[in-house]
C-alpha cells in the first residue's frame, strides 16, 4: 500500500512539474530575448528613453512581452442545447420536404444521380447532397454574391432576384454599393488606380500577361525573379520561391518536405490546404489542440519515446505545422512557445502566414516580427499574396538549401505556369511601399491604421455584448451567432443596410459555432466602422444574439481609435 501511495504521489509530482515546464516554455523565448537586450543596453552604456533602440520592444501593439491573449468565451449548455434543437428542426423539415418532393407535391429542381446509373457507386455523398438541397440552398442568397468593382473599403454588388427559392437568379441590371467588411484587403492595396496599378499595367507592355509554359521548361519572368529576391530580403532569410496559387503553395509543397517515415504535427484549426498537403505527403499525422503548448509537447514527447507504430522505428523527421493567424478563429499562434518546443525536441517548423504577412508586426513582417522572434528559427516560412498585397499566389522562404530543393522537387514547377508578370509586379510594388522604398511612410501608416481599426472594432463589439474570438490585435474578427438561422438573418439584414459581410456555418465551422466574420482593412475609415458597429448592435438586439457574459468588463472602458 505504501509503495502504491508513493507511486501515485510521484506521478502527481511529475505531472505538475511537466505542466510547470510547459508553461515556462511559453515565455522562455521572450525572457531570453529581454535578457539579451538588457545585456546589450548595459554594454552600450544604457539607452535613453524615446530613442529608436528603446522602442524595439514596443510598437503599435504595445509591449512584445505582453501581447493581447487569444479569447474564446463559451456559451452555457442550455444555449448549446437550443442550437442543436434548431439544427434538428432544420433537418426534420428537410426530410419532410424530401418526402413531398418525392411524390411530386413540390417540383424537384436539384441535381441528382442519373436513375439509369442507380447500380453504380454514387459520385456524390448522400448527406452532402441532402444538406445542399434542403439547408444550404435556403440561404444561398447570402453567399456567392457577384461583385463588379474593386473590393476596397466599399464594393459594388450585382443585384439579383430569385423566384424559385435560390435555385436560379434573375439580374435586373442594377448594382448596390456596400461597405466591404468581407474581403481580405488588409492594407488596402486592392486598387484600380495608384502606383501598384500603374506599374502592373506597364509590366504587361514589357512582359505580357503569361509565360505560357512551366518554370522547368522556359523559366520564370523577370518580375517574378525580382520578387523572389525582394521577399527574401523583406523576411530576412536566405532565399524565397514564389508560386502562382496560394492553395497549391501548401498542398503541393508539403509532400516535398516529408515522407512516409516522417511525422507531421498539425494544429487542430489548420487550413484545408495544409490538411490536403499532409494527406498527400503520406506522412503520419497527429493533431494537437489549438494553440495548446501542453498538447503539442505531449505529442512530441510520445513521438520521440515510442517512434513510428507502423515500423517500430524512430521517425526520421518531425514537422510542426501552424498558422500565424487562423482565419476562422481570429487567433494568433503562440510562436515563442512553439519555437521553444521545436528547439527542445529537434523538430522542424512550418509557419503559414497567409493572413499575417503584411498585416502583423511593426513593419508588416508577420507574426515572427509581431512576437519579436528570429525568422531563422522558423524552418519554412509560407505566405500568400492574396490578402495584404492585393494580388494572387504564394511563397515559401527559408534557407537557400530548402528553397533550392523545392525548385527541383516541387510539382508546381512541372505542372503549373509561373506567376503572371503583372501580378508579380503588383506584389513587388506593394511590398516596396510597405518597406518604405517608395520614399514615403505610406506603408507604415497603413500598418498602423489596420492595427487601430482592428483593435477599435473588436473592443466595441465586446462592449456591446457580443462574443468575439481571437486576439484583439487580429484583423480577422469572428463574431459568434451560433444559430444556423441567424446566418441568413445577418447576411440579408446587413445587405439591406448596405453592408457586405461574410456569414459562416457548418460545415466550415462546428455545428454549434455559426459566426459573422469581419475582415478589417486599413482602407476603412472610422466613420465606416462606426456605421457597421451601429448596424450590428441594432441587429444583435433584434435577434438577441448578444451572448457574452463579460460585457460588464468593458462597460465603462473608454475605447479610442
Image (cartoon, rainbow, N blue to C red):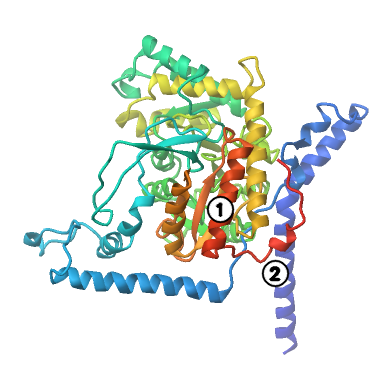
Q: Callout 1: few (<14), some (14-19), or many (20+) C-alpha neighbours within 10 Å?
A: many
* Residue in view at x 42 percent, y 52 percent: 492
Report the front residue among 164 and 193. Answer: 164
Expressed as whole percent of the image width and height from the top left, the position of residue 296 reads 59, 57
Q: Which residue matches tag 2?
A: 15
Q: Is residue 131 left or right of residue 402?
A: left
Expressed as whole percent of the image width and height from the top left, the position of residue 207 reads 37, 12
Q: Is residue 454 left or right of residue 403?
A: right
Q: Is residue 502 left or right of residue 210?
A: right
* Residue in view at x 77 percent, y 40 percent: 33
The reply to whether callout 2 and callout 1 are in contact (CB within 8 Å) is: no
Between tags 2 and 1, which lies in front?
Answer: 1
* Residue in view at x 27 percent, y 57 percent: 165
Q: Is residue 128 visible?
A: yes
**What is the quadrant of residue 214 in the picture?**
top left
Callout count:
2
**What label does residue 348 carry, if any?**
none
**What is the quadrant of residue 222 in the picture?**
top left
**What label does residue 536 carry, if any?**
1
Q: Is residue 320 visible?
A: no
* Residue in view at x 73 percent, y 58 percent: 555
Q: CA distance from mark 2 to mark 1?
A: 46 Å
Q: Secondary structure at mark 1?
A: helix
The residue sitting at the bottom extreme is 1
Amino acid at each position: 500500500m505504501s509503495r502504491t501511495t508513493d507511486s501515485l504521489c510521484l506521478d502527481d509530482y511529475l505531472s505538475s512539474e511537466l505542466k510547470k515546464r510547459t508553461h515556462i516554455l511559453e515565455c522562455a523565448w521572450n525572457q531570453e530575448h529581454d535578457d539579451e537586450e538588457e545585456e546589450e543596453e548595459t554594454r552600450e552604456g544604457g539607452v535613453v528613453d524615446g530613442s529608436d533602440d528603446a522602442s524595439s520592444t514596443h510598437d503599435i501593439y504595445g509591449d512584445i512581452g505582453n501581447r493581447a491573449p487569444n479569447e474564446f468565451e463559451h456559451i452555457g449548455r442550455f444555449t448549446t442545447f437550443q442550437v442543436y434543437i434548431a439544427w434538428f428542426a432544420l433537418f426534420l423539415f428537410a426530410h419532410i420536404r424530401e418526402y413531398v418532393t418525392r411524390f411530386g407535391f413540390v417540383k424537384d429542381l436539384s441535381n441528382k444521380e442519373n436513375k439509369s446509373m442507380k447500380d453504380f457507386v454514387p459520385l456524390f455523398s448522400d448527406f452532402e447532397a441532402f444538406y445542399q438541397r434542403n439547408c444550404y440552398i435556403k440561404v444561398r442568397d447570402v453567399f456567392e454574391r457577384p461583385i463588379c468593382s474593386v473590393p476596397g473599403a466599399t464594393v459594388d454588388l450585382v443585384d439579383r432576384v430569385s423566384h424559385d427559392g435560390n435555385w436560379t437568379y434573375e439580374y435586373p441590371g442594377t448594382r448596390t454599393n456596400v461597405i466591404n467588411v468581407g474581403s481580405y484587403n488588409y492594407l488596402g492595396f486592392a486598387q484600380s488606380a495608384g502606383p501598384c496599378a500603374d506599374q502592373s499595367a506597364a509590366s504587361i507592355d514589357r512582359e505580357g500577361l503569361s509565360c505560357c509554359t512551366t518554370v522547368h521548361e522556359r523559366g520564370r519572368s523577370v518580375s517574378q525573379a525580382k520578387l523572389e529576391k525582394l521577399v527574401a530580403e523583406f523576411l530576412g532569410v536566405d532565399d524565397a520561391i514564389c508560386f502562382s496559387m496560394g492553395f497549391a503553395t501548401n498542398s503541393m509543397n508539403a509532400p516535398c518536405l516529408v515522407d512516409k517515415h516522417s511525422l507531421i504535427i498539425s494544429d487542430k484549426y489548420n487550413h484545408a490546404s495544409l490538411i490536403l498537403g499532409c494527406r498527400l505527403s503520406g506522412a503520419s499525422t497527429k493533431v494537437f489542440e489549438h494553440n495548446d503548448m501542453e498538447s503539442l509537447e505531449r505529442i512530441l514527447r510520445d513521438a520521440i519515446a515510442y517512434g513510428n507504430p507502423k515500423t517500430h522505428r524512430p521517425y526520421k523527421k518531425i514537422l510542426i505545422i501552424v498558422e500565424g493567424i487562423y482565419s476562422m478563429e481570429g487567433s494568433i499562434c503562440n510562436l515563442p512557445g512553439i519555437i521553444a518546443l521545436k528547439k527542445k525536441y529537434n523538430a522542424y517548423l512550418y509557419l503559414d502566414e497567409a493572413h499575417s504577412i503584411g498585416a502583423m508586426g511593426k513593419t508588416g513582417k508577420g507574426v515572427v516580427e509581431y512576437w519579436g522572434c528570429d525568422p531563422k528559427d522558423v524552418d519554412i516560412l509560407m505566405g500568400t499574396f492574396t490578402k495584404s498585397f492585393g494580388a494572387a499566389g504564394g511563397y515559401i522562404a527559408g534557407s537557400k538549401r530548402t528553397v533550392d530543393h523545392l525548385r527541383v522537387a516541387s510539382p508546381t514547377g512541372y505542372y503549373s505556369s509561373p506567376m503572371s508578370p503583372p501580378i508579380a509586379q503588383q506584389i513587388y510594388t506593394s511590398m516596396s511601399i510597405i518597406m518604405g522604398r517608395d520614399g514615403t511612410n505610406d506603408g507604415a501608416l497603413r500598418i498602423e491604421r489596420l492595427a487601430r481599426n482592428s483593435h477599435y472594432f473588436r473592443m466595441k463589439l465586446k462592449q456591446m455584448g457580443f462574443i468575439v474570438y481571437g486576439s484583439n490585435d487580429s484583423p480577422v474578427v469572428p463574431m459568434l451567432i451560433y444559430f444556423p438561422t441567424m446566418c441568413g438573418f445577418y447576411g440579408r439584414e446587413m445587405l439591406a443596410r448596405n453592408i457586405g459581410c461574410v456569414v459562416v456555418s457548418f460545415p466550415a465551422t462546428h455545428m454549434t459555432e455559426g459566426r459573422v466574420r469581419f475582415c478589417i482593412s486599413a482602407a476603412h475609415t472610422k466613420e465606416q466602422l462606426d456605421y457597421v458597429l451601429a448596424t450590428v448592435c441594432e441587429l444583435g438586439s433584434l435577434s438577441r444574439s448578444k451572448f457574452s457574459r463579460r460585457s460588464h468588463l468593458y462597460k465603462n472602458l473608454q475605447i479610442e481609435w
